[in-house]
Amino acid sequence: MTLRDLKVRRVITKALLYAVMIVVAIYTVGPFVWAISTAFKGPGENVYAFPPRILPEEPTLSNFVTAWQRVPYFGQYFINSLLIAGGSILINIGASSMAGYALARLQFPGRSLAFWIILSTMMIPFQVVMIPLFLVVLQLGLLNTHLGVILPTAVTAFSIFLFRQAFLKLPKELEDAARIDGCSEWGIYWRIMLPLTKPTIATMVIFTFVSSWGEFLWPLIVLRSPRMYTVAVGLAYLQSQFSANLRWIMAGSVLATVPVLIVFLAFQRYFIEGATAGALKG
C-alpha cells in the first residue's frame, strides 16, 4: 500500500468519524433544541407538526411568564433546590475529600479493605436503602425538612473514589517537606493537598449539583409541604396540572435547566481533567 493510499484511507476514516459524531450530537442535542423551540412558540403554532419546525413563527416569552405564575411557589422551588444543592456540595466535598485523603495518604490497618467496602456500595441501588433511610430521617425528626433531603444522600462512594485517586497522584515529597516545616496532618490536607485537587473539586461540584438539582424521588418522599418542594417536584406538578399545554411544560423545563448550564459553564475549565483523574493511577 502506497503512502497516497494511506493518506486517502486516513481522510476517509476521519470523515466517517466526524459524520458519526455529528449524528450522535444531533441525536443528543435534538430534544433539548426542540424543547427550547416549543417554549418560545405562540398559541397558534402546532407543536406536534411533523417534520418539527425548529424556529418559531411568532416567538413569545409569555409561556415562561405563565409557567412561573401558574405554579404555586415556583420561585420558591428554585430557592429550595439551590439550598439543597449547595448543602449537598459542601458536605460531599468536605467529607469525601477527607475520606479520600485518609484512604490515599494515611497508613492504617484495613485501609484497602475499607476502600473496597466503600466502593462496593456503588453497586447497591438506591431503592434498596430507600425505606431504611426514610425510617432514619423519621426518627431524627428531619421529615419535611431540607436537611432530611441533604444528609442521607450527600456523601457518595464515587466522590470518595475520585478524591482518593486525585490525592494518589500528588507527590509524597510535598508531605515530607510540610512535615519538616512542622505542619500538622490537618494542615497538610487543608493547606497543601486539597488546593491541588481543584479539577476534582470542580468535577464534584458539577456532578453533585446536577444530581441534587434533578433528584425527584427522594425529595418527593421526604418533603410534605408544597412550599418545601424542589424544582424537579414542581415540574411534575406543572406537568400534571397543564399536560394539555406543552408550551408551558417546556418553558418550565427550560427555566429549570438554566442553573445547571450556568454551573457547568462556570466549572468546565477543570471538568475533563477532574473526570479522568480516576483513570490515571490505581
Image (tube, helix red, strand yellow):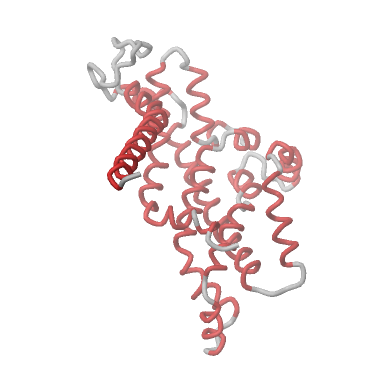
Q: Position of residue 100 (x, y in %)?
A: 61, 64
Please tell me which residue lies in front, 119 or 226: 119
- Point 52% across, 85% down: residue: 177
The quarter of the picture where residue 71 lies is: top left
- Point 52% across, 89% down: residue: 181
Outermost residue, left side: 58
Please tell me which residue lies in front, 14 or 162: 14
- Point 53% across, 84% down: residue: 178
Q: Position of residue 228 (x, y in %)?
A: 55, 37
Please tell me which residue lies in front, 81 or 130: 130
Q: Position of residue 140 (x, y in %)?
A: 72, 48
- Is 97 above or below relative to 142? below
The quarter of the picture where residue 258 lies is: top left
Q: Is residue 24 toward the left or the right of residue 156 in the image?
A: left
Tell how many labels: 0
- Is 94 above or below relative to 61? below
- Is 280 above or below relative to 232? below
The quarter of the picture where residue 9 lies is: top left
- Point 67% across, 41% down: residue: 143
Q: Is residue 96 toward the left or the right of residue 274 in the image?
A: right
Please tell me which residue lies in front, 13 or 151: 13
Q: Is residue 133 toward the left or the right of residue 257 in the image?
A: right
